[in-house]
Image (cartoon, rainbow, N blue to C red):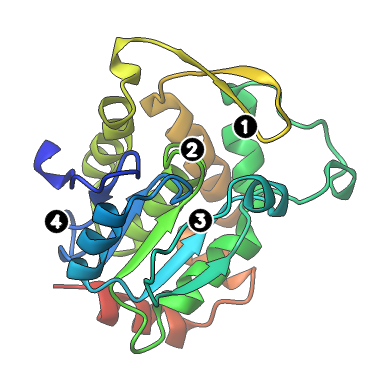
Amino acid sequence: MTDAFIDIPGVRNFRDAGGIGALRRGVLYRSGSFHTLTDEGARRLKALGLRTVLDLRSPVELEVWPDLRHGLDHEALNLPTLPANREDVDQPWPEDQAALYPFMAQTAGPSLAAVVRRLAVPGALPALVHCAVGKDRTGLTIAVLQSLLGASEADVTADFLLSNVGLGLDRGPTPYVDETGTERVSRPVTAELLASALGWIHTRHSSLPAYLRAHGVTDEELTALRTNLSA
């Protein structure tokens, strides 16, 4: 599946999310942010025909690291996976990856519903989903979409784990500075992390479609999503 990677100068971890389940190639991409996109990277994105970019980052991240366009005319939507303010949630903010994934499952419903709704609209494709490095928030979002298109758990997990290769995390954790200037450590993703998020959804909502319906997605939109993305 490493052939899914596409070299886009200035964008990390860029790859095609299709080719598993019924999700066809060339319609849905995933990556890190565009804040260091180069002119050559923009030319390659233009060649892909990109129409929509769904940015899962927080408003603060967008302010500190705005996506660059270099003349690209795609539609950009900000659909944050995590709450903008920590005060908006009545539970402890996650301090590590193990806590982050079930927390995302609890809080990402509105974002995931908005992603599904947008991708169900005619003319939205090809589309791209990204966060900061395309690993955690993007990983969960793409896993949900691939699962809705009938991909097996094994294939969804294998694609999810490719972020370790795309970010060099297969060689171990790497340091980085977050949007507040705080030094942190980026750690590899594991199958157990994704399973904890999807398990939370299935335990409380029985299925991904039921979870999305609880956040306002209609059966018609789910059908349109599958029609738009399927081979």
Query: Circle 4 is placed at which residue position?
Result: 19
How many other residues sit within 10 Å of disc 1, few (<14), some (14-19) or many (≥20)? some
Q: Amino acid at mark 2?
A: Asp
Q: In terms of sequence position, does the residue under pointer 2 or pointer 1 come before the other? A: 1
Query: Circle 3 is placed at which residue position?
Result: 67
Disc 1 to disc 3: CB gap under 8 Å? no
Q: Residue at x 35, y 63 (%)?
A: 148
The circle on residue 29 is none
**Between 4 and 63, the one nearer to me in the picture:** 63
**Between 84 and 95, the one nearer to me in the picture:** 84
Q: Residue at x 32, y 33 (%)?
A: 163
Q: Residue at x 53, y 39 (%)?
A: 197
Q: Amino acid at mark 4?
A: Gly
Query: Circle 2 is placed at which residue position?
Result: 136
Q: Amino acid at mark 3?
A: Asp
Mark 3 or 4: in front is 3
34 displayed left or right of 123: right
213 in relation to 135, above or below: below
